[in-house]
Amino acid sequence: MNKVEHIGIAVNSVSLAGNIYEKLLNTTVYKTERVESEGVLTAFLQTGPNKIELLQALNDDSPIAKFIAKKGEGIHHIAFEVDDIVAEMQRLKGEGFVLLNDAPKQGADNKLVCFVHPKSANGVLIELCQGI
């Protein structure tokens, strides 16, 4: 794993949260994107090398809707950049981690992604990201 790629934050509204984080980070939302496969609307902010992904549920079945219903708004996941997502998935499986995906899938921000089950990582949902 190369670096923290972004921190994902579950929010009720990317518009309202975007306004808050723009003021907090003294930057602007540079991209919004719908990821239908995950049922989310995302908004990205960057300050220096650090990125924040705001995640809003598009429907009640979305993992984000379920997360917010259970835990409220807040940090949802930490994403790590990898060079070879398939190799990293194989490595992690070999180390005993439980992956939520059998194969990488298309995620936001033009990335291939895979998630590591939180029970395998001390309660933290981990996302692997590889640029396409």
Image (cartoon, helix red, strand yellow):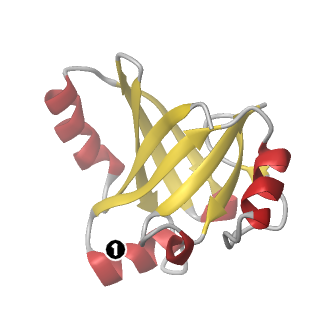
Asked which secondary structure carries label 1, the reply is: helix
Q: Relative to 51, does residue 76 appear above or below in the rendering?
A: below
Q: Residue at x 15, y 29 (%)?
A: 23
Give x and y (percent) for residue 119: 52, 77
Q: Say which quadrant the N terminus sits in.
A: top right
Direction from residue 18 to residue 103 in the image, left or right: right
Give amino acid for label 1: Ile
Q: Which residue is mark 1?
A: 68
Direction from residue 34 to residue 42 in the image, left or right: left
Give x and y (percent) for residue 69: 33, 81
Instruction: Give whichever of 116, 69 is nearer the camera.
Output: 116
Q: Residue at x 79, y 31 (%)?
A: 132
Give x and y (percent) for residue 104: 80, 54
Instruction: Give whichever of 100, 2 is nearer the camera.
Output: 2
Which of the 4 image quadrants contains residue 85?
top right
Give x and y (percent) for residue 106: 75, 48
